[in-house]
Image (tube, rainbow, N blue to C red):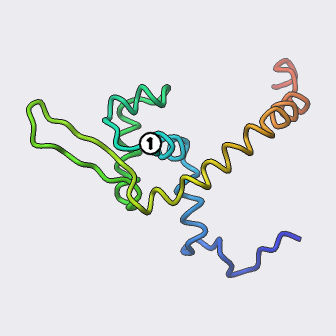
Amino acid sequence: MSGFVPGGVFLADCPGRLAVELIADKWTVVVLAGLSEGPVRHGELVELIGGISRKVLTQTLRRLEAHGLVRRHAYAEVPPRVEYELTPLGATLIDPIHTLTEWARAHGDAVLEALDANSEPAAHHS
């Protein structure tokens, strides 16, 4: 039995669903983890994360800022300097992210083995 009931926590307008939608984005958890050590500049975050384009990082940061998880601070300097950091609300996600990371370390090989065991050779696809 799943424990989910109609009208429960994962309805579209419920907080549980919002939390899942926020962290389900491919880059959200990685960006939040990248910001967990303190303020970081955009370019530094691109290098730290790896594999993310500047455009996608900007979109992700804007989304996280709009949801109150990230703060953008632009310094009045020449050349301009912008740093991003977690808000206190954003920082509350770091422990759950670490828990997911530990789960992945402990069970990642089993997941990959299951994928390998269930994959069909490409020749069988029409």
Tag 1: residue type?
A: Glu
At horizontal 87% and vertical 30% (from top left) the residue drawn is: 113
Residue 106 at x, y = what percent? 79, 39
Q: Is residue 101 left or right of residue 39?
A: right
Side of 96 where 116 appears, left or right: right
Q: Position of residue 124 (x, y in %)?
A: 87, 23
Between 18 and 122, which is closer to the camera in this rendering? 18
| On-image quarter of the C terminus | top right
Q: Secondary structure at mark 1?
A: loop
Relative placement, left or right, of 69 versus 124 is left
Q: Report the label total.
A: 1
The residue located at (57%, 75%) in the rendering is 14
Q: Quadrant of the N terminus?
A: bottom right
Pick the residue in front: 113 or 48. Answer: 48
Vertical comparison of 121 with 38: above or below: above
- Residue nearest the viewer, comparing 8 with 122: 8
Residue 23 horizontal/vertical position (percent): 56, 53
